[in-house]
Amino acid sequence: MKIKKNTYIWIGVFALLIIVPFGLFLYNQSTPGKLDAFAQCLGEKDAVFYGAFWCPHCQTQKSFFGKSSKELPYVECSTPDGQGRTQECIAKEINTYPTWEFADGERLLGEQSLATLAEKTGCELPAE
């Protein structure tokens, strides 16, 4: 059975369409976000971000951190079905999302700017 030249071309194109995006995905996962240190500092300063996966304001708050959102001191307050709250959030009386709680016990409700979080914790924002 003889394979035509076009077949090799199509196999090559298909391989590139699979390999290149997968390689970019792996590269993107392994490079740090520009706010990683800031997000980690928030946790080190005992700031906690309480939220729910279904909350659009929580998603917006996370988007301020870009790929560094994975480093946030985040506590999920929603049960997996989205119909209830976790025991931790009930015990802490977290009723609004997002809620930021700081080491001094103060809470800020709603989306907070990076500058506000820096001011509350003393964490340094990276230069733009």
Image (tube, rainbow, N blue to C red):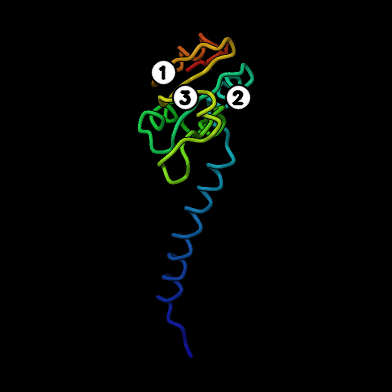
Sort mark 1 into few (<14), some (14-19) or many (20+) by Cα contacts within 10 Å: some
Left or right of 41 on screen, residue 116: left
Residue type at the position of mark 2: Gln
Q: Nearer the viewer, mark 1 or mark 2?
A: 1
Instruction: Give the spatial CA distance, label 3 vs label 2.
Output: 22 Å
C-alpha distance separating marks 1 and 2: 21 Å
* Mark 1 in CB contact with mark 3 (< 8 angstroms): no
Dot 3 falls on a residue whose secondary structure is: loop
> In the image, residue 94 lies at what x, y percent?
47, 24
Q: Residue furthest left?
A: 56
Tag in front: 1 or 3: 3
Question: Badge 3, how many Cα within 10 Å: few under 14, some, many 20+?
Answer: many
Q: Quadrant of residue 96?
A: top left
Q: Position of residue 43 (x, y in %)?
A: 60, 22
The residue to which callout 1 is attached is 109
The residue sitting at 56% across, 13% down in the picture is 124
**Looking at the image, which residue is at 51% across and 29% down?**
89
Picture coordinates of residue 119, whole percent (x, y): 51, 8
- In percent of width and height, residue 6 lies at 40, 75
Residue drawn at x 41%, y 26% is 97
Of 24 and 72, the residue lying toward us:
72
Residue labelled with disc 2: 40
Circle 3 is placed at which residue position?
Answer: 94
